[in-house]
């Protein structure tokens, strides 16, 4: 009962039609020897489409396609990392330049958090791995489409 009430309270904090246009653009993170980019479309008829490409310091490559749209459960971030089936995260918090998407049933992550300040977009995923709190963060900067990190080719 408490979980249902808490979930209802969290969902009520997220507006039905949030303005997430601040996420749109091409974003690049060249920190820690990696190259990570995310590209988000502007919102069109309630749909935003994104994709990400990451190259680790050791040369490993991963990708993700995503969309944000309004579904019956609310505004939802559908993530498909490396071609896996989509996983849904529902918007539970939204404000100027901040959005939090949650799926408590997912193994990892259970939370996806985006925030923006100026030409910087921060992305963070949080959850539990092996019974311990875990997270990963990216610090993106706005860049021209398909810009690469200096050491990359």
Image (cartoon, rainbow, N blue to C red):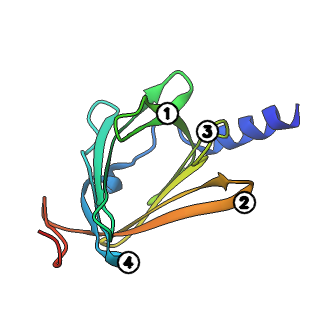
The residue at which mark 1 appears reads as: 87
In three-dimensional space, the C-alpha distance between marks 3 and 2, rounded to whole angstroms, equals: 15 Å
Classed neighbour count for the residue bearing mark 4: other residues with Cα under 10 Å, few (<14), some (14–19), many (≥20): few
Q: Position of residue 90 (x, y in %)?
A: 55, 37
Classed neighbour count for the residue bearing mark 3: other residues with Cα under 10 Å, few (<14), some (14–19), many (≥20): some
The residue at which mark 3 appears reads as: 106
The residue at which mark 4 appears reads as: 32
Which residue lies at the image location 74% right of the left edge and 54% below the top edge?
131
Q: Nearer the viewer, residue 21 or 78?
A: 78
Mark positioned earlier in the residue sequence (4 or 3): 4
Quarter the C terminus occupies: bottom left
Is residue 129 visible in the rendered structure shown here? yes
In three-dimensional space, the C-alpha distance between marks 3 and 1, rounded to whole angstroms, equals: 8 Å
The residue at which mark 2 appears reads as: 132
Which residue lies at the image location 26% right of the left edge and 62% below the top edge?
27
Is residue 96 visible in the rendered structure shown here? no
In three-dimensional space, the C-alpha distance between marks 2 and 1, rounded to whole angstroms, equals: 22 Å
In three-dimensional space, the C-alpha distance between marks 4 and 1, rounded to whole angstroms, equals: 27 Å
């Amino acid at each position: 009962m408490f979980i249902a009430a808490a979930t209802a309270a969290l969902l009520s904090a997220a507006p039905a039609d949030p303005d997430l246009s601040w996420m749109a653009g091409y974003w690049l993170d060249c920190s820690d020897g990696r190259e990570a980019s995310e590209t988000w479309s502007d919102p069109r008829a309630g749909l935003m489409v994104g994709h990400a490409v990451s190259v680790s310091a050791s040369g490993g490559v991963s990708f993700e396609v995503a969309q944000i749209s309004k579904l019956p459960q609310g505004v939802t971030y559908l993530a498909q990392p490396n071609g896996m089936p989509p996983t849904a995260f529902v918007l539970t918090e939204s404000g100027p330049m901040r959005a939090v998407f949650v799926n408590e049933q997912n193994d990892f992550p259970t939370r996806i958090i985006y925030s923006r300040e100026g030409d910087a977009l921060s992305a963070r995923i949080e959850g539990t791995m092996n019974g311990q709190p875990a997270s990963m963060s990216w610090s993106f900067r706005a860049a021209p489409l398909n810009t690469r990190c200096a050491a990359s080719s």
